[in-house]
Image (cartoon, grey):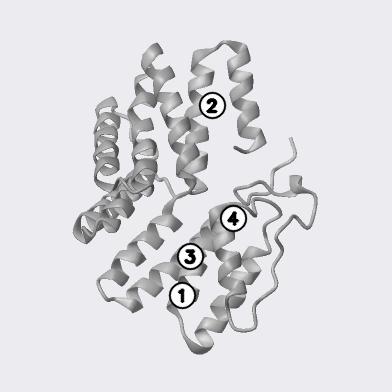
């Protein structure tokens, strides 16, 4: 668990303030989902749900099962995890709040796709784009474009898939979210051939070098192994090159307070 996450949870526990503890646990679970770490995400989501259930925090209790279900699906229990995600999303809708709805739908779309149900995955992605347009949520759109591209690729539409990955990379650059840039460009490297692949590889190396920390996270490990496995092997750093405070684990440069 990142030190900042552990510190936030410890502070909430010291305050003996249940709502602060519920928020610290719930959003820490989301953080580990972003990092694709199912064990930590599941543990924190379960802890958050327990606090929310005890204190009647209905909104947070509604969506923690989505994160927990995602984690269980990633660990192999696809059907059980998806059922929990669907129940959580239905509970969230019942609260009348759909903040981060596109994000939750994207998690379900990925799970449907892993189960081989491409059509339901596509329906989730379509609904996620619709919700995002209504709510003006754009922060997760790069990842939605990637998932859309994955499904198009499953359908055999390579050109449209490539267009989605390139749009995802562009959007992530506009939003200054290198993690989403990294995920998009890794897909391009695997998809392209010849000179176009060489350009994608150069973009991947450039994107990887934007990071100063988080080298143990699954995305950066995957990117590093991909680069080093290419012909000639590209040398990339495994540890921070500058002071780790210059950029956070999400790839954002913090503003001065």
At label 3, counting other C-alpha atoms closer than 10 Å, the crowd grade (few under 14, some 14-19, many 20 or more) is many
Ranked by sequence position, the earlier of labels 4 and 3 is 4
Q: Position of residue 13 (x, y in %)?
A: 58, 16
**Do we see residue 13 in this rendering?**
yes
Q: Spatial distance from mark 4 to mark 3, Cα to Cα?
A: 13 Å
From the viewer's perspective, is residue 151 above or below residue 23?
Answer: below
Q: Spatial distance from mark 4 to mark 1, Cα to Cα?
A: 23 Å
At label 1, counting other C-alpha atoms closer than 10 Å, the crowd grade (few under 14, some 14-19, many 20 or more) is few
Q: Are marks 4 and 3 in contact (CB under 8 Å)?
A: no
Instruction: Residue 190: give its label.
Output: 1
**Residue on which disc 3 sits:** 184
**Residue on which disc 2 sits:** 24
Q: Position of residue 187 (x, y in %)?
A: 46, 69
Q: Are marks 2 and 3 in contact (CB under 8 Å)?
A: no
Q: Is residue 18 left or right of residue 147?
A: right
From the viewer's perspective, is residue 2 above or below residue 171?
Answer: above
Q: Spatial distance from mark 1 to mark 3, Cα to Cα?
A: 10 Å
Q: Quadrant of residue 215?
A: bottom right
**Residue on which disc 4 sits:** 176
Which quarter of the rendered picture does the C terminus lie within?
A: top right
From the viewer's perspective, is residue 135 above or below residue 121?
Answer: above
Q: Spatial distance from mark 2 to mark 4, Cα to Cα?
A: 25 Å
Q: Quadrant of residue 59?
A: top left
Ranked by sequence position, the earlier of labels 1 and 3 is 3
């Amino acid at each position: 668990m990142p030190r900042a996450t552990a510190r936030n949870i410890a502070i909430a526990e010291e305050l003996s303030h249940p709502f602060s503890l519920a928020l610290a646990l719930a959003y820490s679970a989301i953080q580990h989902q972003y990092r694709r770490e199912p064990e930590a995400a599941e543990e924190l989501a379960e802890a958050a749900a327990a606090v929310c259930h005890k204190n009647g925090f209905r909104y947070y209790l509604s969506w923690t099962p989505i994160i927990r279900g995602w984690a269980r699906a990633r660990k192999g229990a696809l059907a059980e995890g998806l059922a929990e995600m669907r129940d959580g999303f239905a509970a969230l809708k019942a609260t009348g709040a759909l903040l981060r709805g596109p994000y939750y739908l994207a998690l379900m779309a990925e799970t449907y796709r892993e189960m081989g149900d491409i059509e339901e995955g596509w329906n989730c992605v379509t609904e996620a784009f619709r919700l995002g347009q209504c709510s003006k949520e754009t922060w997760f759109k790069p990842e939605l474009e990637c998932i859309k591209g994955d499904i198009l690729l499953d359908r055999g539409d390579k050109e449209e898939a490539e267009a989605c990955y390139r749009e995802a990379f562009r959007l992530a650059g506009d939003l200054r979210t290198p993690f989403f840039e990294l995920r998009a460009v890794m897909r391009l490297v695997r998809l392209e051939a010849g000179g176009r692949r060489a350009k994608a590889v150069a973009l991947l190396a450039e994107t990887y070098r934007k990071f100063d920390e988080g080298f143990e996270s699954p995305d950066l490990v995957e990117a590093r192994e991909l680069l080093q496995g290419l012909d000639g092997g590209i040398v990339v750093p495994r540890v921070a090159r500058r002071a780790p405070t210059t950029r956070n684990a999400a790839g954002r440069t913090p503003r001065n307070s």
